[in-house]
Amino acid sequence: MSESLPLLCETAEKLFRDLAERQAPFAAAWAEIEAAGFPLLLTPEVEGGFGGDWQDAFAVLRIAGAHALAAPLAEAIAAAHVSRRAGWAPRDGLTVIATSSAAAFVGDRFTGTVAAPWGRAATYVIARVSDRVVRLAVADAAITESANTAGDPRDALRFDGAAAEDAADDDIALWGALARTAQIAGALDAALSLSITYANERVQFGKPIGKFQAVQQSLAEFAEEAAAVNCAGRAAACAADCGDASMEIAAAKLRAGQAAAIGARVAHQVHGAIGFTHEHELHRYTTRLTSWRSEYGNERSWSAYLGAWAVQQGADGLWPAIVARADVQNGS
Amino acid sequence: MTPHIVVAGRLALRDARSVETFSIRPFRPPGDVAQLRRDVRAFLREHQPVGGAARRANCWAVGDSAFSRALGAAGYIGMIWPKAYGGHERHPLERYVVLEELLAAGAPVGMHWIADRQSGPLLLRYGTEAQRQTYLPAMARGELHACIGMSEPGAGSDLASVRTRGERTADGWRINGQKVWTTNAHNAHVMIALVRTSEGEKRQDGLTQFLIELDRPGVSVRPIVDLAGGHDFNEVFLDDVLIPDENRIGAEGAGWKQVTAELSLERSGPERYLSSYALLVELVRLAGGDADPTLKALIGRFTAELWCLRQMSLSTAAKLAAGEDPALEAAMVKDLGNSFEQEMPRVVQGALEHIDLAAPADLSRILSVLLLVAPSFSLRGGTREILRGIVARGLGLR
């Protein structure tokens, strides 16, 4: 965790809130985000970046989630991280990591389809193909534009015999999953905050609906889910700064996916019909929670991954493995 | 959908989005934690608990006097108490490490659990010097056991409505009333009872805690057999029980405050999410020779939840160790933890092929016990509804 984290968070809070209030168009918003240096959060200072770690990135992306930032910051931060691990030189323009790909090499040429958030705005996309990671120029792709449940760009990039830089395998979904967990943590906290405020203001049967035990119990459940994601996400980010964090990230994203579904359900139930309108801001969080739950691994994929890990540890080895990893990550 | 008057006239974005209800703290016990774990595991290998696999389920409700004495002799009870009272002056987070190792191994820690967790700490905080000298060393040796005299027939979740009365006598108190759901009273030597000593303005006023030795005249303990045929809890009748004033814990009328502090200790430990861990161990064992993807996915989900709950529990323990009251965090971890402990057996029963609950296999035995006792997880130590009420208050809804 960097010493300037409080300042970093303050800057992020101010910028992301401002962008949301102004409903700034994407190009302008992204220019401001880049100017502030956020996409280079994990890039070392000697290479012109901020020199932060995943705990810093978690804090910033959590704030991005809490303001429903409509920009590929998570994707760009993860892409810079993967590029560095791959030994690729930084490139100008936006690089994002793909959410999935169905592609193959034919010789040294790349053919297939890559799903890329904000693909239309990106210069490069990083994808995982069988046991390699590749960096591709978006200019080589035919783009089919689409959008997620929040209306954010989710484009399909079709490559046909494109040139590609490739590097040793890296599970890019892990880095995407960690970034999404941070966004989910923030969006859950924001939706929870809105729900509590609304429950305290909305009067029915002569009192605020938050005074009814049924509503209190639902909101308590919501708060517990949000707390679980924040706790799990921060622990996973801390693990990522210590070395192998595959188990922790898998667990955190799995947990975040469950919580995203529960949180969105309770937030809408508490808000009643007003929360179902376009005019009310609740949908900015809940539609993204819905989309983020699916991306970079949902509960099914991460539970299969974690299940294989747990079985590999064995019945008597599972507990020692879980606690030994945490002991190292806690610096004990 | 009914048309609504628009209350959000414009996009109203609010400041600082974080509702940080759960404070996240780093868990950093002093010393060589890996060595401490090795020591506890070595102790467990040397003192293999007796009895069948089912005793590994919900193991902190399973008592074994010999095991508790051995654990006490090894220095694992009263770990954080002063040496002057038989303790070992270890760090609270070292104690946490020992507890979670014992629970994960399914060790039968039920006999001394209450004394170590809350009765001892209560005496350290509010007891007299004589009380500490009398009770703590024997508790730390794992020889003297305590039970909690809180619940009554008319006072369950609504604890402030206790009616057991304490009346002043010439040199002490005369106690009359009844306690119920008193875990381990039939093995315990002493009860710490919450008693009404006056009618205060508020219901929480006028309550006082007393040490009541269970061999005093007028105390009778009657078993309550649970639905699984087990005998954990009891009714305790107090008929004209005479105790000296030296048995009073803390100030007269301070009982509510003391009990509230005690409940934070009661709710914040790793036992609130690990009661069903033995089942996960058996599931992994079963999957070892089997590539069933459904089973593996299930194990993955449970592992994620376990890991997440452990992170929350570690953070809560760190807050407690820092001398702060984690009442809200503890309520959250206990509620989520109890849901996990209950969900695991329920889901496993429906997910496994050909599961015969009557089979003599370890998995069947553990699953059967957990299916039977799981309803108690979200009742004991504060019901789900009470815990969520505490969380709701923390959110500013009450």
Image: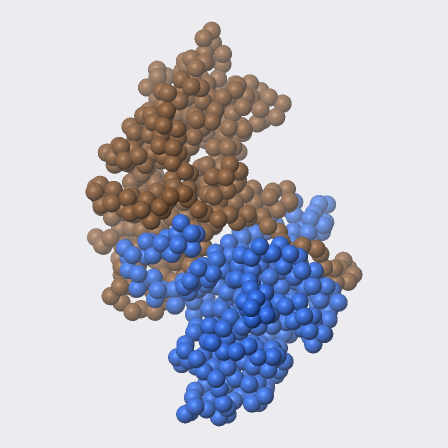
Chain colours: A blue, B brown
Closest to the observer, B60 or A42: A42
Q: Is residue A40 visible?
A: no
Q: Residue at x 47, y 76 (%)?
A: A87
Task: Quadrant for residue A96, please give it.
Answer: bottom right
- Answer whether residue B257 is visible to the viewer in this image: yes
On screen, A104 above or below A98? below
Q: Is residue A98 above or below residue B22?
A: below
Residue A236 vs residue B21: left or right? left
Residue at point 57% right, 52% down? A223
- Asked whether, in this view, residue A45 is left or right of residue A196, the answer is left
Q: State the quadrant of the C terminus of chain B.
A: top right
* Residue B172 percent location from the top left of the image: 45, 11
- Looking at this rendering, what residue extends furthest in the front direction? A46
Name the image quarter holding the N terminus of chain B.
bottom right
Q: How many numbered discs?
A: 0
The residue lying toward the viewer, choosing from A293 and A66, is A66
**Position of B47 compared to A206: left or right?**
left
In x, y percent, where is residue A304?
39, 68
Q: Nearer the viewer, residue B173 or A64?
A: A64
Q: Residue shown at 35%/15% (left/top)?
A: B217
Q: Residue furthest top?
A: B170
Q: Which quadrant of the view contains residue A60? A: bottom right
Q: Nearer the viewer, residue A216 or B332?
A: B332
Q: At 25% across and 48% down in the image, what residue appears?
A: B53
Q: Position of residue B42 (x, y in %)?
A: 24, 45
Q: Is residue B150 above or below residue B322?
A: above
**Residue B347 image offset from top left, x and y in percent:** 38, 58
